[in-house]
Amino acid sequence: MSRIYDEEWLGQRLRILRPAPQGWVRAAQELPSARRSLDEIVARAEADLEFRTALIADLENALAQAGYEPDLRGVDELRKRLESR
Amino acid sequence: MLEALTDAELVQRCRAGDSEAWNTLVERFSRYVYAICVKGFRLREEDAEDVFQDVFTRVYTHLDKLRDDAAVRPWIAQLTRRLCLDSIARSSKEQPAPEQDFEESSDDFAEIEDAFAVREAVTTLGEACQEILDRFFAQDQSYRTISAELDLPAGTIASRIARCLRKLREELEGRSEPSRESRE
C-alpha cells in the first residue's frame, strides 16, 4: 500500500525531530576530548602517588588544583575509575 | 563535506579518531535520540539529558564493537530505548507510575522512524528548503522570524514552504516507487 504524503502528514513528521538542547549536543561532541582528559588524569594518578592520594581525599579540589575542569559527569566517571583500580 | 558521508563512512572516520566526524555523527543522530527520549518514552527533561549523554558516551566507547557500520542508526535506537527503559525503571522505583503510559507510545516510535526518513529526504532538497522547513516545523519559528533571519520578504515565506513541501513529497514518492514495484 502506497502512502499519501500530504502536507499535514509531512508537517507532523517534520515537527518530530526537534533540535536537542544545544548544551547537550555540545557536551556529546566534546566527549572525545573529555575522555582524553580523564585518561590523562588516571594515568597521572597511577604514576604519581601524591596526586592519587589528593584525588582520593578530595577529588574536585585536587582536580581544580591541578588545572582540570571536568564536568559533573566526568567527575563521577573519574571517581568510578579511581575506585576500580 | 562530512554531512554527505554515509552512516558507515562516518562511523569508520569516527573509529579512526576523526573528531570532526564525531561532531557530525552527534549532529546527525542528536534529534533522533532526543525524540526517542521525549516523544517515545516521555522522559522528563533531566532524565532525557542523562540518557542522551549516556547514549553518546556508549556509542563513542563501543564503536569498535559495532559489527555492521551501516547499522549504526538501529544500534543507536536500540541503545537509547534500553537506556530509557532503565531510566524509567529507576524512576518508578522512586515514584511508581502506571505502565500504560509507555505501552501507549508505540505508535510514536513508528512516527519517529518516519520522521527520520523524511528528514533524510529533506537533505536532498537543497539548503534553502532544508533551512526554511526546519525553522518553520522543527523550530516553530514564525513567518516574521524566518523572514528576518533569512532576509526574505515576509509575503513569500508561505509559498516557499509550500513549494519545498511539494518537492519533498515528490522526493518521497520517488523513493517509494521502487519498493512498490518490487512487491508486484
Image (spheres, rainbow, N blue to C red):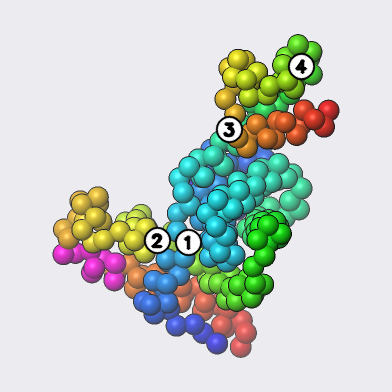
Q: Which residue is mark 1?
A: A17
Residue type highlighted by circle 1: Leu
**Residues at marks 1 and 4, CA–CA distance in whole angstroms:** 47 Å
Q: Is residue B97 left or right of residue B132?
A: right
Q: Which residue is mark 3?
A: A71
Q: Position of residue B18 (x, y in %)?
A: 60, 36
Q: Which residue is mark 2?
A: B138
**Residues at marks 2 and 3, CA–CA distance in whole angstroms:** 30 Å
Task: Please tell me which of labels 1 and 4 falls first in the chain.
Answer: 1
Query: Residue B141: which quarter of the image?
Result: bottom left
**Residues at marks 4 and 3, CA–CA distance in whole angstroms:** 21 Å
Q: Give the secondary structure at mark 4.
A: helix
Magenta segment: B155-162
Indicate the chain on which mark 3 is placed. A
B151 lies above or below A54: below
Residue type highlighted by circle 2: Ala
Dominant secondary structure (helix, strand or loop) of the stretch shown in magenta: helix
For image coordinates 59% across by 65% down, the residue present is B41
